[in-house]
Amino acid sequence: MSQPSTWTKTIVASMTSYIDAGSIVAGGAGVMLWQEYLGMDEYKVGFFSALGPNALGAAIGALIGGRICDLYGRKLVYTYDLVFYILGMLLVIFAVNFPMLLIGYIIVGISVGADVAASWTLIAENAPAENRARHCGTAQFMWALGPCVVLMLSAIVNYFGLGLLGNRLVFAHLAVIAFIVWIMRLRMPESEEWKSNKEKEKELIASGVWQKTSYWDLFTNRVNLRGLLLLIGVYMIWNLSAGTMGGLLPYIYSNAGGLSTTASQALPALLFGTSCLATLFIFMTLADKYSRRVIFCVVANLFILAWGLFLLPAAWMGMPVFVMIAVLMGINNGSGQQAFYQMWAAEMFPARYRAAAQGFSFFTARFCLSIWLFIVPVLMAKSGMTIVAVILVAFAAISMLIGTIFCPNTAGKTLEQIENERYGGGK
């Protein structure tokens, strides 16, 4: 059987991002409908938002899946976790009570978290050094395309008055996509980078040069620790704002902006449509050729401005401002912190730690987000949107500063070159 092309591998792996982000936004788009159907108070809304693919569920999946990827290969997780994703989706689609809905959404979250650690690692390992941003950006493009399609579908089914049935159909489309991707993945090979490094590792351990790799090396090795702190500082802090955008922005538009359900879902569709364009024409086009530090800084500042617009006087908060917020957030979402994070997470660690580092940093980001998403609806109900917006601006600003100051110089270098520069002859 002939080997799939590099781009085929990239595109199939990138579909993880489509169903991950699609699941997050489908939940956010339908939360008001489920709230009405099941009589969910703000605390149950918080649990629903905090325990699924946007937060704790994905966090747990990434932590476990990342370590399994490094021990037993990317393909094991990459292939079979979509089976669990589909099972979780079926629970959501046919949910008739809150426990059924919540359990299904948690299973979906765990599945996509594990898949992200495997897929994002695979993309970077397969990508040519001179085009790594272009390949990694494909996953980011799919991460924007999934929500864009989900929100447009949600707006359509709401326009035709399908209500909760419409949201169930949106979730069903994600289950169908996951099944198709699972079939395609069955013929995808294991990462050559992982296989090669695993063989070298076995030889060095047998000769007594190395000891067996431990998970705790991530925290006891100074180079590993510095890399983890950068990833957490950039992605975890940014994700507190971005996760609010992805999981609760329709809820915020409806409750803080007074928009209709259709409008509150159509605006985020504009956001993610802008994300697709930003990924194609900024990150994928420029990040392999020009200063990544400058690109990161400019795009990260747009996210600060976007959340800052929520601080305008209520009389100014009309549709033009909401459109501007969507566009600014979309540019950042497509070519900002997450795009750089998924690339840096693969570049900055050797193959024996790579997926585990991605999994741990992803776990940290989604775990903290789960706590924050439980708080946001309650905080909005008691204190209003202004306080929430101030906090989100602060998160975005801190992430921007960390990424701009500590941006690694990895453009155009092979993974082996980066490893030699960062680790020398040591572990």
Image (cartoon, rainbow, N blue to C red):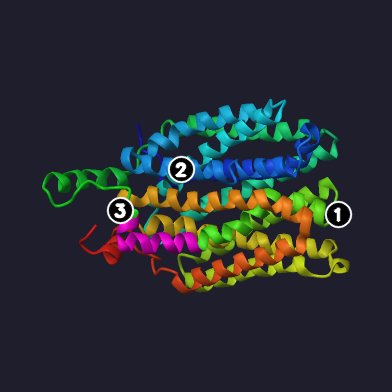
**In the image: residue 99, left or right of residue 220:** right
Magenta stretch: give its range: 219-233
Amino acid tagged 1: Gly
Number of the front mark, 3 or 1: 3
- Tag 2 residue: 8
Under circle 2, the secondary element is: helix
Q: Position of residue 154 (x, y in %)?
A: 75, 41
Q: Residue at x 71, y 61 (%)?
A: 388
Cβ–Cβ under 8 Å for marks 3 and 1: no
Distance between the Cα atoms at labels 1 and 2? 44 Å
Q: Nearer the viewer, residue 166 or 235?
A: 235
- CB of mark 1 within 8 Å of CB of mark 2? no
Amino acid type indicated by mark 2: Thr
Quadrant of the rendering where the C terminus is positioned: bottom left
* Front one among 195 and 255: 255
Mark 1 and mark 2 lie on one chain; the one further toward the N terminus is: 2
Q: Residues within 10 Å of mark 2 (few under 14, many from 20)?
A: few
Distance of mark 3 from mark 2, alpha carbons?
33 Å
- Secondary structure under tag 1 reads loop
Residue 142 visible? The answer is yes
Mark 3 crowd level (few <14, some 14–19, many ≥20, 10 Å Cα) = some
Looking at marks 3 and 1 on the same chain, the residue that comes earlier in the sequence is marked by 3
Pointer 3 residue: 217
- Residue that appears at 12% across and 49% down: 208
As drawn, the label of residue 258 is 1
